[in-house]
Amino acid sequence: MNTEILVRNNVQVKGQGDTTMVFAHGFGCDQLVWREVAAAFEEDYQVVLFDYVGSGKSDKSQYSTERYGSLHGYKQDLLEVCAALDLKDIIFVGHSVSSMIGALASIEQPHLMDKLIMVGPSPHYLNEPGYRGGFDKEDIDELLEMMEVNYKEWAKYLAPVSMQNPERPHLAEELEQLLCSNDPVIARQFAEVTFSSDVRDELEKVSVPTLIMQPKYDAIAPPEVGEYVKDKIPASELVVMDAMGHNPHISDAQETVCLIREYIAKH
């Protein structure tokens, strides 16, 4: 066991069981976003949580703009965490950009994952001819500029857009606090890497059985994106959630748990 990696990525191992579930957070967040969902599986599974380098309580001194200038650096974090724990045949659950990080990891090491579960995935966030990613390039440029000029104002703007559920304002407030806890410079680069990524051509190489969980209304990854991912990954299923917003694992943990359980039981 490579303890250096475990410390670097603030790896937490909980639960019990022969099968391991690995939960990976999205941009601007950390492993705490999974606390309710992950806890629901601890009785039957070994549960692994971690922070990507630069996020949460990871060792930020290990961050480099070269390594983390693309999704492959984050994919390497995931692969190294799994290797440090000697994991195989895992159930990987990734939110947002982590869905694509998980997809890339499954392509590189097909036997690492038994199942791949994507929550609000997007292989490409930009609108292109014949493809609706949800954002025009000008939108992304404005977001990145806002992050540079006034990071806290950017967090205050993005949190309610991402979270939705205005009748529960505490959810957006919690997400805003989480976003504000990041290093602004690292967060901006992670944002640029996330929103400029294009994994569309890789999806057909994913051979792992995949569940795509698409919130009913998602301002970050619209429903058309979920349909696109379903059409491109051969052994995939799409379920449209009742949950609203880009963070159903936070806003609707119970539905998230139920759908994951149903998929695992069915396969």
Image (tube, rainbow, N blue to C red):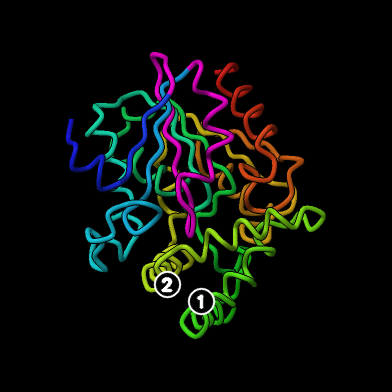
Q: Give the distance between the C-alpha atoms of the residues marked 2 and 1, in whole angstroms.
A: 6 Å
Task: Identify the mark nearer the N-term, 2 or 1.
Answer: 1
The residue closer to the viewer here, 80 or 33, is 33
Residue 99 is situated, as x and y percent measured from the top left of the image, at 48, 46
Is 176 left or right of 81, judged from the image as shown? right
Q: Most extreme residue toward the right, as rendered? A: 167
In the rendered structure, are the residues bearing label 2 and label 1 in contact, judged by CB atoms less than 8 Å apart?
yes
Left or right: residue 48 versus residue 256 is left
In the structure shown, which secondary structural element does the residue marked by tag 2 occupy? helix
For label 1, the residue is 151
Quadrant hosting residue 139: bottom right
Would you place residue 166 above or below residue 18 in this image?
A: below
Q: Magenta stretch: residue 24 in it? A: yes
User: Could you say which is closer to the camera, residue 24 or residue 178?
Assistant: 178
Residue type at the position of mark 1: Tyr
Within 10 Å of disc 1 (Cα), the crowding (few <14, some 14-19, many 20+) is many
Residue at 31% across / 25% down in the picture? 88
Give the label on residue 143, or none. none
Q: Is residue 43 above or below residue 229?
A: above
Under circle 1, the secondary element is: helix
Q: Position of residue 222 (x, y in %)?
A: 67, 57
Q: Out of 20 and 180, give the one closest to the viewer.
A: 180
Quarter of the image for the C terminus: give it. top right
Q: Could you say which is closer to the camera, residue 100 or residue 260?
A: 260
The image shows residue 14, relative to residue 66, as above or below, that is: above
Give the residue type at disc 2: Pro
Residue at x 63% of width, y 63% of height: 159
Q: Is residue 96 magenta?
A: no
The residue positioned 67% from the left and 59% from the top of the image is 172
Circle on res. 184: 2
Mark 2: give few (<14), some (14-19) or many (20+) Cα within 10 Å.
some
Region of the chain picked out in magenta, as a range: 15-44
